[in-house]
Image (cartoon, rainbow, N blue to C red):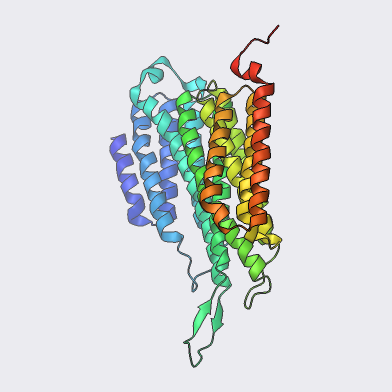
């Protein structure tokens, strides 16, 4: 009878109410049912809370799809101070209450520990918390920048050649993407430290490392491109016809790099926590990421100083210097995979040099780059000869 009453109450919520109120009532009901079931050891109430948790999750997804519609005619939005975010925060609080109560040793018994369904839910509940929290903030960030974008609308009157239209600051779309990526890097880094603090299973570590790698690639392929677009806008249109571009268009790059550094630190801590498995892959990933970011940084400053026509020469020299640095680091740390990565980079640099760079360089530039790369490879050879005993494990001649 109690179960039937609860079912009818649950059905009555969407009949009498709509939108956020239904979601919050279902979330509160789920937390209440779990609390009654766990504290009083009544399986029925706890089991009834499980489908309510999922029902709440799907309800808030539906709410998100309906409420975050920002348009030019409806562009009034207050970041983190709106009913949509309050609903998300309440749902997260209810999910967190269930999670904390489930991990409270005071209410755990041998029967609970051996219950398969409860073990499954102990995995799904924190997953629901993470997903809900992530998208709650991501949607707020997206709506905030979309609101600012529509507020920059400038009505261009109709002329003889063109009809009337609206002009927007399209760079704000780049800012939107960049800050979504920045928050994603921060969020996943905090989750990594939380997993280490709570001493969760190693399975969580490998899942999280995969997610970390995906976000890192999104930054390298997507975020750096948008950062370069902002730089181009600042350098070419600092006093644009319709909008003013500030130094923030350049400075945002270094804010993003701080979030990347935080992500790499969290990845390193996760590898230490898991026993340093796949450490080789992590080292190669970090070396490749550092090469990509520093190359992008070099191109930025060449562009700022109007020397972007020398980027081929500069990149080839930088690749050679970076390879020498990798060899030195690989010898110092006795890391064979780092040294092999350096030789692969040298090979790629030589291929780039002979098949791409030399065709468009002046004779002086060709001679300069060949001399510099020759000296760098000579330095690599010197290091291998000097430290061959350490590298190849040979015994010195007596």
Identify the residue at image location x=67%, y=44%: 371
Task: Name the residue at the bottom extreme.
Answer: 160
Q: Position of residue 379 (x, y in %)?
A: 68, 33
Q: Position of residue 102 (x, y in %)?
A: 46, 27
Identify the residue at image location x=40%, y=20%: 112
Against 72, residue 17 (above or below) is above
State whether residue 249 appears in this view. yes
Q: Quadrant of the N terminus?
A: top left
Residue 32 as seen in the image, left or right of residue 229: left
Identify the residue at image location x=49%, y=29%: 205
Against 80, residue 170 (above or below) is below
Against 247, residue 43 (above or below) is above
**Front position in the image: 25 or 166:** 166
Identify the residue at image location x=43%, y=53%: 21
**Front position in the image: 93 or 282:** 282
Q: Position of residue 335 (x, y in %)?
A: 59, 24
Query: Which image quarter: residue 242?
Result: bottom right
Q: Position of residue 355 (x, y in %)?
A: 51, 50
């Amino acid at each position: 009878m109690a179960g039937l009453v609860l079912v009818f109450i649950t059905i009555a919520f969407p009949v009498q109410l709509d939108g956020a109120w239904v979601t919050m009532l279902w979330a509160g009901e789920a937390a209440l049912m779990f609390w009654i079931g766990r504290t009083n050891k009544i399986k029925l109430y706890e089991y009834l809370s499980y489908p309510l948790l999922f029902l709440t999750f799907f309800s808030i997804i539906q709410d998100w799809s309906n409420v975050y519609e920002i348009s030019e005619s409806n562009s009034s939005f207050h970041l983190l101070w709106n009913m949509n975010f309050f609903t998300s925060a309440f749902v997260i609080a209810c999910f967190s209450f269930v999670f904390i109560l489930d991990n409270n040793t005071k209410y755990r018994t041998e029967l609970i520990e051996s219950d398969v369904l409860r073990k499954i839910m102990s995995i799904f509940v924190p997953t629901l918390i993470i997903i809900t929290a992530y998208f709650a903030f991501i949607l707020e960030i997206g709506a905030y920048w979309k609101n600012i974008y529509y507020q920059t609308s400038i009505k261009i009157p109709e002329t003889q050649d063109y009809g009337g239209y609206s002009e927007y600051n399209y760079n704000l779309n780049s800012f939107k993407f960049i800050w979504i990526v920045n928050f994603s890097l921060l969020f996943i880094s905090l989750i990594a430290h939380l997993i280490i603090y709570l001493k969760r299973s190693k399975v969580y570590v490998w899942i999280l490392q995969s997610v970390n790698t995906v976000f890192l690639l999104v930054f390298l392929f997507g975020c750096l491109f948008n950062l370069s677009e902002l730089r181009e806008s600042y350098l070419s249109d600092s006093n644009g016809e319709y909008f003013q571009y500030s130094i923030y268009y350049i400075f945002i790059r270094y804010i993003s790099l701080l979030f990347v550094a935080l992500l790499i630190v969290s990845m390193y801590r996760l590898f230490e926590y898991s026993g340093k498995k796949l450490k080789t892959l992590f080292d190669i990933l970090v070396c490749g990421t550092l090469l990509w970011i520093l190359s992008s940084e070099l191109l930025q400053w060449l562009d700022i100083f109007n020397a972007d026509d020398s980027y081929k020469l500069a990149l080839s020299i930088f690749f050679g210097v970076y390879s020498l640095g990798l060899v030195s680091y690989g010898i110092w740390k006795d890391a064979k995979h780092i040294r092999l990565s350096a030789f692969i980079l040298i090979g790629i640099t030589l291929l780039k040099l002979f098949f791409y760079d030399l065709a468009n360089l002046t004779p002086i530039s060709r001679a300069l780059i060949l001399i510099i790369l020759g000296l760098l490879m000579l330095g690599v050879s010197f290091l291998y000869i000097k430290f061959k005993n350490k590298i190849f494990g040979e015994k010195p001649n007596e």
